[in-house]
Amino acid sequence: MDPEAFLDLANQVIKLKMYPYFDVAHSLLCALAVREDLGAGAQAFSRKHPLSCWLSTMLVIFAGGMVANGLLGEPILAPLKNTPQLVIGTVTWYVVFYMPFDVGYKVAKFLPVKVAASAMKEIYRAKKVYDGVSHAAKLYPNAYIIMVIVGTLKGNGAGFTRLVERLIRGAWTPTAMETMQPSFYTKASLVASVIFVLDKKTDLISAPHALVYFGIVIFFVYFKLSSILLGIHDPFVPFENLFCALFMGGIWDSLAKLLGKGQPKEETKDAKKTN
Amino acid sequence: MDPEAFLDLANQVIKLKMYPYFDVAHSLLCALAVREDLGAGAQAFSRKHPLSCWLSTMLVIFAGGMVANGLLGEPILAPLKNTPQLVIGTVTWYVVFYMPFDVGYKVAKFLPVKVAASAMKEIYRAKKVYDGVSHAAKLYPNAYIIMVIVGTLKGNGAGFTRLVERLIRGAWTPTAMETMQPSFYTKASLVASVIFVLDKKTDLISAPHALVYFGIVIFFVYFKLSSILLGIHDPFVPFENLFCALFMGGIWDSLAKLLGKGQPKEETKDAKKTN
Amino acid sequence: MDPEAFLDLANQVIKLKMYPYFDVAHSLLCALAVREDLGAGAQAFSRKHPLSCWLSTMLVIFAGGMVANGLLGEPILAPLKNTPQLVIGTVTWYVVFYMPFDVGYKVAKFLPVKVAASAMKEIYRAKKVYDGVSHAAKLYPNAYIIMVIVGTLKGNGAGFTRLVERLIRGAWTPTAMETMQPSFYTKASLVASVIFVLDKKTDLISAPHALVYFGIVIFFVYFKLSSILLGIHDPFVPFENLFCALFMGGIWDSLAKLLGKGQPKEETKDAKKTN
């Protein structure tokens, strides 16, 4: 592939319209995630508590926007004013939970459908991360950390609203905080946010913007497909282990242990597992 | 009663001033609700934790405004700037919890007092639902769902802040989410919000606005009094069962069960109970 | 000390710059508080969950501003735009948790260091309470209660975000609500807020503003040092007991008990302990 054509493709990806196909893919996977989170009793739950089921699905679909708005002092409900997206979300929710003979769920779980929807959702995610970083950069042009936080939250909002989402369904799982065991999506959104901030605010990245964006899209889609098809779940782990060993005390702890004057053994033995 | 006089009455109801009598009735019932929620240890609790008791009562009194503000990006504390209402709330709280020989509580529990206060509170509720819908309509003229959500929250805010209110008192009851078992007040506020939205935004309702408003007030007061005096708690249940049977999978589930290829029996048997 | 020189000193205290030394002291004590809250497993936790550890430390450091912003409809993340303070917070966090051979923690725990940092933090606290009251007074010039609430939250924000802070670390302790057992810092911030409001909005306090401010600083520092060095933890208790006996039913309960027609004995026996 010659570079010219590649740049052309990148420019087309950056201008992709999200409505309606990408919205459908995103809503579908969100509704599936809610259904899977409910486990075996999902169907019975959806019959007994349709309101709760609908509210929690909407929260998952609009999570990124709502959390980011909440933290930036903007109206939390504002994402719901996008009526077409709300209609898509409601229809998808209905299809996944209430179709006769569970047809909707079975189709959505069918591998080719799921793979296509997942790939589209990752393209959507890249766009949301980028929009989050841009939005925060407009509000606070010098606060890099706010840009990174907003980008990450827009990229994987559902991870951070999981506790509230489950609470709406009457379940409370305080130990399932995303901050304790960040998922691959959170880490990937964090890395993407950092790259977008570097691209936007510094001269460290000399590639054209479209290429940076396209690279992130490819990275998201590639690892999502690896995860579905090959079962590779977190390519960040080795880097984290290295980083933690160097900067988060790993090496010093081992040294202190060797010298016999560090903290007791049972504290250090799980020190190499990272967050 | 001739229609002229009826319309006149409706026009007077719509212009009723809430301050101070309706505020007193609302605060009184809120303080009573907190006291009853505390159960047998209410008086001991109010002696040991007056601050916590006062804060949670204020949260119940101002719940609707606070939740709606929080979701619309407006200051959550703003409702507290209404000093007269705050004074009324504090005095009522004091009367219900701390009067010598518990006189205040006993008077408030006296049936005629309670019936009068409840009727007034329902008139207040209708006004709050209407104000919520109008306020949201001003902010987002095309987002019907936001109008309905804000109207419902303003109508029964205390239901949705219950978890926080109890948390202020050191109790945590995650399964008591309003979304899981919406109370009659939530459902009634939801229906009223939908009617107000239809009245405001469409031509489907041809009756004059004052009559629509008055009808909702009568509906609220009538069912509140039925609930206190006759023990009828939820007139919506039959409609919900019908709706769920038709649209939320009820009929299809039965059909699938008959055909012997639906979900297992233990999942469907409680499917007819609605949210 | 002659009054002239005293007023001069007060005027200098009011103009003290907080950056960078007071920020360092504040961040240091916040990081120490997080580490102590984690208990014996603090070091192991910081190795396994650095992200969670950093986020919860930042939440403690910026708690006052974040909570006050959240309640006043301003962006919750806004305090993070103060990049120098964020850098100080991060460096302090790193020093307390990750220094080789735990040098940072040991130095921070060394009594003279801790005493100096604590005294500086109390000066910082007085400034934050004053800033909170002033900020709220600008937004709501007549809402005294909002000024007091914002002043208190700015003074001891970390107390009120403790639940969220622990939740970020995967622990959930709903009974540890600050409102149930307000700490000395909360009570002192409350009293200071009330005094600042009286000073600002009424003529009841005739002393010059600088003296009032200086008096509060001395009061904060004095009791903090008493608490560290002498073990006096809450000088408010006798006043609270008196207040509760007079106004929160204490006397009437005793009277009712004497007359044998009050609430049962097991309810009143702990009535004298205050919130």
Image (tube, coloured by chain):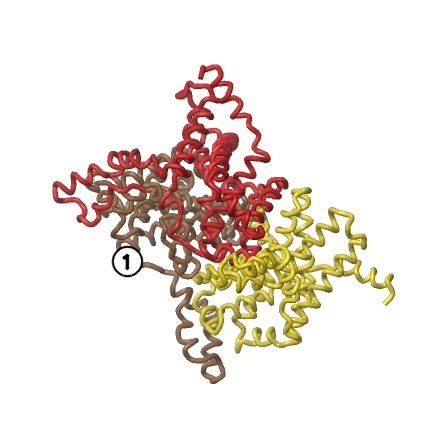
Chain colours: A red, B yellow, C brown
The vertical placement of C113 against B31, above or below, is above
Seen from the viewer's position, the closer of residues C262 and C67 is C67
Judge the density around disc 1: few (<14), some (14-19), many (≥20) Cα neighbours within 10 Å.
few
Q: Quadrant of residue C28?
A: top left
Q: Is residue C163 visible?
A: yes
Q: Secondary structure at mark 1?
A: loop
Seen from the viewer's position, the closer of residues A104 and A216 is A104
Amino acid, disc 1: Gly
Report x, y in % for residue C218: 37, 49
Q: Residue at x 50, y 37 (%)?
A: A117
The vertical placement of B189 against C262, above or below, is above
Q: Residue at x 68, y 67 (%)?
A: B223
Q: Is residue C206 visible?
A: no
Report x, y in % for residue C266: 41, 78
What is the chain identity of the residue bearing mark 1? Answer: C
Most extreme residue toward the bottom is C260
Q: Which residue does the numbered mark 1 point to in the structure image?
A: C231
The vertical placement of B52 against C156, above or below, is below
Seen from the viewer's position, the closer of residues B134 and A39 is A39
Q: Is residue B204 left or right of residue C45?
A: right
Q: Is residue B169 left or right of residue B178?
A: left
Q: Is residue A49 left or right of residue B246?
A: left
Q: Residue at x 81, y 55 (%)?
A: B207
The quadrant the C terminus of chain C occupies is bottom left
Seen from the viewer's position, the closer of residues C240 and C170 is C170
Q: Quadrant of residue A1?
A: top left
Report x, y in % for residue A122: 47, 34
Q: Quadrant of residue C106?
A: top left
Most extreme residue toward the front is B259
Report x, y in % for residue B20: 67, 62
